[in-house]
Image: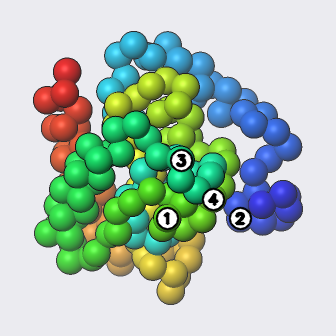
Amino acid sequence: SRNPCSEIYVGPKAASEPETQAVTSFLKSLRNRLVAYLTFHNYSQMILIPYAHAAGQKAENFAELESVGRRAAAAMRAAGGERYDVGNTVDLLSAGAGGSEDWAKAVLKTRFAYCIELRDTGDYGFLLPAKYIEPTGREAFEAIKVIASAAAKSK
């Protein structure tokens, strides 16, 4: 959103904030070693695969990303009973620019890049009740293990 009062405000320009600049600089220093990049958000219960900026734009290794993403979603469901959809961001949500997973994939050429949208599906929005935090963390950890394993095997 371009509205500074919105929960999803994009900021005045790309990488305008010092925190973003620091993370960007750090990730660039890892460019040749970074095999996986994960960004966690809430809410929607989805594992999103680049790219989000336009319909029909998918990562060159989309099939591999989808396969690993589906395994991660299955591990998440086994850990907490919740279903996570897997797919291209535009197909599951809508087009939108500025996602760090897109940047990691396009600029850093990171093999495995995902945005994992954690619980819930919208009942609580960004204010997930405390009782769901621990099970959501367990689900996220299972996804991390699956993706890290795939990344380690790909080297």
Give 15 or 87, whichever is nearer the viewer.
87
User: Gap between marks 2 and 4, in whole Å?
Assistant: 17 Å
Residue 101, position in %: x, y? 50, 41
Residue 87, position in %: x, y? 39, 60
Relative to 126, residue 66 above or below = above
Q: Which residue is mark 4?
A: 95
Q: Three-letter amino acid code at disc 1?
A: Asp
Dot 1: element: helix
Q: Quadrant of the N terminus?
A: bottom right
Q: Three-letter amino acid code at disc 2?
A: Glu
Residue farthest to the front? 56
Residue located 34% across and 62% down the image? 86
Q: Which residue is mark 3?
A: 57
Relative to 118, residue 60 above or below = above
Give 125 or 102, whichever is nearer the viewer.
102
Residue farthest to the bottom? 123
Mark 2: give few (<14), some (14-19) or many (20+) Cα within 10 Å: few
User: Gap between marks 1 and 2, in whole Å?
Assistant: 22 Å
Residue located 53% across and 47% down the image? 57
Please say if the residues under marks 3 and 4 sit with CB atoms less than 8 Å apart. Answer: no
- Of marks 1 and 2, which one's residue comes earlier in the chain? 2
- Of marks 2 and 4, which one's residue comes earlier in the chain? 2
- Of marks 3 and 1, which one's residue comes earlier in the chain? 3
Q: Which residue is mark 1?
A: 91
User: Gap between marks 3 and 1, in whole Å?
Assistant: 10 Å
Mark 4: give few (<14), some (14-19) or many (20+) Cα within 10 Å: some
Q: Which residue is mark 2?
A: 7
